[in-house]
Image: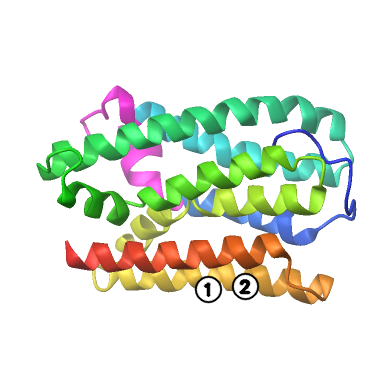
Amino acid sequence: MGTAPTRGSQRDSNLFRWVALLVLPVVFAGFARSFYLRPLIRHTQLILLLQVHGTLMTTWVVLFAVQTLLIAGRRADLHRVLGLLGVVLAILITIVGFATLQYSIVSHHGIKPFSPEFFEAFVAFDGISLSLFAVFVAMAIVLRRYSDRHKRFMLLATLNLLPPAVGRAVALLTHQHVELVTLGFMLLALAAIISVDYARNRRLHPVFLWGGAAMAADYVATFYFQTQA
């Protein structure tokens, strides 16, 4: 998203297209019962905040897939136009995401805002992942003229939105060790993406090095506080 890159490598990358397209079914599987198919399964409606949150998240993963396909199809002009939407969308996702986190922690768990328990729950509920999403998108926008950095920051940003969906998808299959399986899946997915990129380019890109390290630390911290709850 952001402005189409004008520097750096312009080679088409199957890796980014495949990741973008695989994210869609993962998100759908994770939130099918609680969001996408909710009217068919449950009689209660989500509050407006959660409806907006789900809609924004869905729009982002769809837009991410569309943007990768546009670049692959050499439609940088449309990529730039939709990139402006991506900037606005990322801001809204961050604001609404933090509001949703606070609502869930306070309303569903009875934890006082900004107490020590609140910050522990913030980490357990993927608050750091949301924070990293905002940081990675901001870096992608700043470095939008450098395609190699821009697209990797956008990929990592999108990957940071996946843990809640993965956790819910895992919970549909088993109620045992859900947090551990989710942690393993996310770490393996991250390692696979970085490994494929390394094999393709014969070097470990700095964005994947430092961004990947931050994400791995986030996943481990999230797992730790989830198991302490």
User: Which amino acid, by three-letter code, is at mark 2?
Assistant: Ala
Q: Name the spot of residue 170 as percent of width and height, x first.
A: 36, 64
Count of all numbered marks drawn on residues in the image: 2
Residue 56: tell me if it is visible. yes
Q: Secondary structure at mark 1?
A: helix
Residues in magenta, as a range: 29-50
Q: Is residue 219 left or right of residue 40?
A: right
* Secondary structure predominantly adopted by residues drawn in magenta: helix
At 70% across and 39% down in the image, what residue appears?
142
**Disc 1 to disc 2: CB gap under 8 Å:** yes
Assign the N terminus to one quadrant of the image.
top right
The 10 Å Cα crowd at callout 1, few under 14, some 14 to 19, many 20 or more, is few
Q: Is residue 162 left or right of residue 158?
A: left
Residue 67 located within the stretch drawn in magenta:
no
Residue 42 located within the stretch drawn in magenta:
yes
Q: Name the spot of residue 34 as percent of width and height, x first.
A: 31, 42
The 10 Å Cα crowd at callout 2, few under 14, some 14 to 19, many 20 or more, is few
User: Which amino acid, by three-letter code, is at mark 1?
Assistant: Leu
Residue 40: tell me if it is visible. no
Q: Name the spot of residue 37 as percent of width and height, x first.
A: 37, 39
Residue pointed to by mark 2: 192
Residue pointed to by mark 1: 188
Q: Secondary structure at mark 2?
A: helix
Figure coloring: rainbow
Q: Which label number is shown at residue 202?
A: none
Q: Is residue 22 left or right of residue 197?
A: left
